[in-house]
């Protein structure tokens, strides 16, 4: 049943003009960032060649900035994609219909989350395939760090989708859900600034920041703590969203 | 009203409990944990006591039961999630996917770090974020290095601070600039600058080896004093070195050998040339891979020319005159460092040190296989070495040595490929005196140089890392095609599909 709901969620998005407009905007911004980063990298490389110096390494000069750009895009676009997950059902009155069907609330939550994750994965890996294809066709990139970066993006998307689903379950308004997701994820992202300090605040920055737990993937390093943190984050958000939906059922 | 107050108090109690629980996981050493626990108990207890009728009614209702169940489930779930993260954090698992394993330490380093036993070793890095992209790059590089060391060394406690944000900690450690790393075990500490795998490993090994090392200042030839507090003595330098963990002691070279615990010997402005036995003692010390710092005044005779020559160093004739400095110090014969060399001891220094009348340091003829010379500090291109400083006006003559001139140079002795000590030579001694060390750049420069000299022993040879892999070559046409695909074709395709779907819905409606 989970797969059925996930497939339905994905198909609804693929049949919605709004989802395609969001995808187009996403790809345009992503394309702009890719072109700029690529141009800067090639320019730095030719400058170094003129000076008979070694150019920038591909990993730190191109793959890491591209990964950072993709992470920021996820942070900015995820609220727009997740806001309608349950908020629209609440506003449209279809949630009661969904809950009265022979489907458990856990299946609804997991199905909707997987559906959104599938859509975002399509955007990330099908729409965003141009960058890795360019690197493979015109260069000799290290493939393992690229796979690590892809894993990082997938885990970040999973965590942000779960957060968006929770916000959408908490509010009947799509706008409120989007704002809550955006402010929470941005707040968690910016906690990284505390990391430079001292004492408990630095510890909060180190342990609580989304940025701290996602940046090493772009550098070709997969840290077990980061993987566990992102999975745990998604788990708690999904659990809370499930319980919120449960409360609708007994009400 | 009472119920409202009780709920606010209860909310504050719950907040204290949540903050306390989070702190218990992330910063158990926090001093206020007991206070938070007390606040949580008092807050939640007051709420339960004052709002009991409403609470019992709510708890007895179906909604209350369900909410409590849901709340408990979420709390348990969050607890499991936090426990999982803490568990994985304590048993670090990392996969370095880079082909050159650039996020991991080399096998030899890992071997040394794993073998370290005993009390934990603190590694404190002071790297600011600031707005400078170079500083940000250095910080990122340090964080990668620190994290690789922390993973490989179970006895290491690695922390990073921004000296601008953590000012109290920076003041406590005596850190005044970015890029400083302090390695400490108990009361033994080492400082390194511009750290890399090699220098950090060496610092850790030195701290782990319980061997006291000191700086000896030569006496017996009219050198500068380390005990009398005058403008020309070296008492401030002694204090600076003590902060580095290096004890400074006088050493009468006419009577005794250089002790085995000596890391560096300073010979500062001898008024009488050193006698042959003293020089022989210094040579023996250098052959043990010791560090020698020689600072002579213009025109004075140190008697060390032959020893300096073994490191490819010598003092040139004349007094350094730099017209560019006149506008800053008002005196062209107090040369200022215009640029620093690429040696690790001075690589990141920016602020110009000022010398108070100096002879130039020159490279003398030597066997390049037996010694390597590094220039540490240079004058501007306009400077020259004035052979007749008394003459007026001071202008560059034909026989004068033309700039840029070396103010400080370092010579590494390695006859037959074996390290045999390092010598640093300066043509001025006043910049090391209490007067000279009033200037912060002078303090930074001498501390860096002596810190480097003190680290010449305990060397572990690490092979250089292979160059980073990966390349990309695109011509103009390929860039245009990729740009068109990224900016026009892909987004345009999505927008075309959106329009098609919208039109189809419109037609269907």
Image: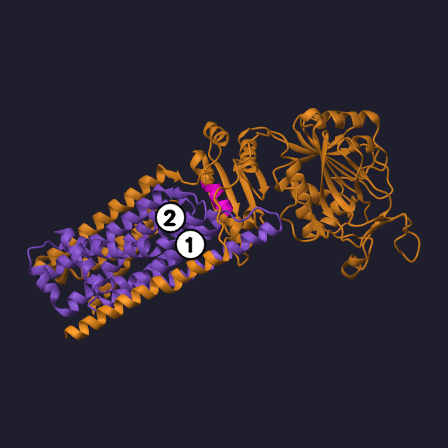
Kindly state the secondary structure of the residue where label 1 is placed. Answer: helix
Q: Decide if residue B251 is on the left or right side of residue B139.
A: right
- In the image, B454 versus A47, the foreground residue is A47
- Classify mark 2: helix, strand or loop: helix
Residue A81, magenta (yes or no)? no
N-term mark: 2 or 1: 1
Residue at 84%, 33% in the rendered image: B303
For the residues labelled 2 and 1, say whether their Cβ atoms are less than 8 Å apart.
yes
Question: Which residue matches tag 2?
Answer: A149
**Chain letter belonging to callout 1:** A
Which lettered chain is shown in orange? B
Residue density around tag 2, few if under 14, some if 14–19, many if 20 or more, within 10 Å:
many
- The lab-note entry on whether marks 2 and 1 share a chain reads yes
Magenta stretch? B141-147
- Residue found 52% across the figure and 35% down from its top: B186
Above or below, comparing residue A67 to residue A12 in the picture: above
The colour applied to the residues of chain A in this rendering is purple
Q: Nearer the viewer, residue B178 or B229?
A: B178
Looking at the rendered structure, which numbered label has been put on residue B355? none
- Report the residue at 31% width, 50% height from top: A154
Check residue B146 for magenta coloring: yes
CA distance separating discs 2 and 1: 9 Å
Instruction: Give the x, y percent position of residue B279.
Output: 79, 28
Quadrant where the C terminus of chain A lies? Answer: bottom left
Residue A66's disc is 1
Residue A64 x, y percent position in the rendering: 44, 51
């Amino acid at each position: 049943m989970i797969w059925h709901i996930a497939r339905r969620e994905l198909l609804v998005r693929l049949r919605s003009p709004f989802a395609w407009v969001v995808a187009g905007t996403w790809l345009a911004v992503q394309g702009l960032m890719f072109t700029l980063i690529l141009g800067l990298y090639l320019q730095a490389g030719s400058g170094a060649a003129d000076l008979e110096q070694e150019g920038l390494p591909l990993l730190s000069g191109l793959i890491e900035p591209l990964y950072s750009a993709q992470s920021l895009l996820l942070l900015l676009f995820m609220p727009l994609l997740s806001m309608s997950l349950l908020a629209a059902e609440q506003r449209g009155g279809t949630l009661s219909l969904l809950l009265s069907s022979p489907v458990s609330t856990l299946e609804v939550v997991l199905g909707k989350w997987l559906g959104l994750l599938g859509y975002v994965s399509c955007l990330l890996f099908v729409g965003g395939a141009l960058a890795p294809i360019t690197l493979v066709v015109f260069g000799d990139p290290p493939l393992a760090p690229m796979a690590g970066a892809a894993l990082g993006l997938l885990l970040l998307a999973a965590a942000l989708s779960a957060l968006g689903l929770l916000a959408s379950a908490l509010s009947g308004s799509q706008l409120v859900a989007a704002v809550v997701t955006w402010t929470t994820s941005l707040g968690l992202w910016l906690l990284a600034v505390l990391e430079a300090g001292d004492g408990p605040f630095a510890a909060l920055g180190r342990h609580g920041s989304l940025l701290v737990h996602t940046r090493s993937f772009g550098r070709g390093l997969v840290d077990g703590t980061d993987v566990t943190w992102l999975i745990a984050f998604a788990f708690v958000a999904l659990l809370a969203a499930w319980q919120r939906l449960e409360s609708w059922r007994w009400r | 009203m009472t119920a409202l107050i009780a709920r606010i108090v209860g909310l504050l109690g719950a907040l204290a409990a949540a903050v306390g629980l989070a702190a218990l996981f992330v910063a158990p050493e926090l001093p206020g944990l007991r206070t938070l626990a007390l606040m949580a108990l008092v807050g939640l207890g007051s709420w339960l006591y004052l709002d009991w009728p409403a609470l019992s009614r709510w708890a007895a209702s179906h909604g209350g039961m369900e909410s409590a169940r849901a709340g408990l489930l979420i709390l348990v779930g969050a607890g499991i999630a936090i426990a999982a993260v803490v568990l994985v954090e304590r048993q670090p698992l990392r996969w370095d996917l880079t082909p050159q394993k650039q996020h991991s330490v080399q096998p030899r380093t890992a071997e040394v770090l794993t073998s370290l036993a005993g009390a934990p070793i603190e590694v404190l890095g002071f790297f600011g974020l600031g707005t400078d992209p170079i500083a940000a790059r250095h910080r990122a590089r340090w964080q990668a290095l620190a994290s690789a060391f922390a993973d490989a060394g179970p006895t290491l406690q690695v922390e990073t601070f921004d000296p601008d944000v953590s000012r109290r900690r920076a003041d406590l450690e005596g850190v005044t600039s970015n890029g400083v790393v302090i390695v400490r075990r108990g009361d033994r500490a080492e400082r390194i600058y511009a750290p890399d795998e090699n220098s950090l490993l060496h610092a850790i090994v030195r701290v782990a080896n319980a061997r006291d090392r000191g700086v000896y200042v030569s006496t017996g030839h009219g050198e500068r004093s380390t005990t009398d507090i005058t403008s020309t003595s070296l008492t401030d330098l002694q204090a600076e070195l003590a902060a580095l963990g290096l004890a400074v002691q006088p050493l009468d070279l006419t009577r005794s050998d250089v002790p085995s615990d000596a890391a560096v010997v300073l010979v500062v402005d001898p008024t009488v040339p050193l006698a042959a036995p003293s020089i022989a003692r210094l040579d023996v010390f250098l052959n043990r891979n010791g560090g020698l710092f020689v600072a002579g005044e213009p025109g004075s005779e140190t008697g060390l020319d032959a020893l300096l020559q073994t490191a490819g160093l010598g003092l040139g004739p004349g007094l350094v005159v730099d017209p560019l400095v006149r506008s800053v110090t008002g005196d062209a014969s107090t040369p200022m460092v215009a640029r620093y060399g690429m040696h690790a001891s001075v690589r990141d220094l920016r602020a110009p040190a000022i010398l108070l009348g100096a002879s130039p340091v020159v490279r003398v003829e030597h066997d390049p296989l037996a010694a390597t010379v590094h220039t540490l500090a240079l004058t501007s291109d306009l400077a020259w070495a004035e052979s007749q400083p008394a003459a007026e006006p001071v202008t560059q003559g034909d026989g004068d040595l033309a700039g840029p001139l070396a103010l400080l140079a370092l010579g590494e002795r390695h006859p037959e490929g074996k390290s045999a000590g390092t010598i640093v030579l300066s043509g001025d001694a006043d910049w090391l005196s209490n007067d000279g060390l009033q200037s912060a750049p002078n303090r930074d420069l001498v501390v860096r140089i002596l810190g480097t000299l003190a680290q010449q022993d305990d060397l572990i040879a690490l092979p250089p890392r292979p160059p980073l892999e990966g390349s990309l070559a695109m011509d103009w046409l390929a860039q245009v095609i990729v740009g068109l695909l990224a900016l026009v074709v892909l987004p345009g395709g999505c927008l075309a599909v959106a329009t098609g779907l919208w039109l189809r819905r419109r037609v269907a409606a």
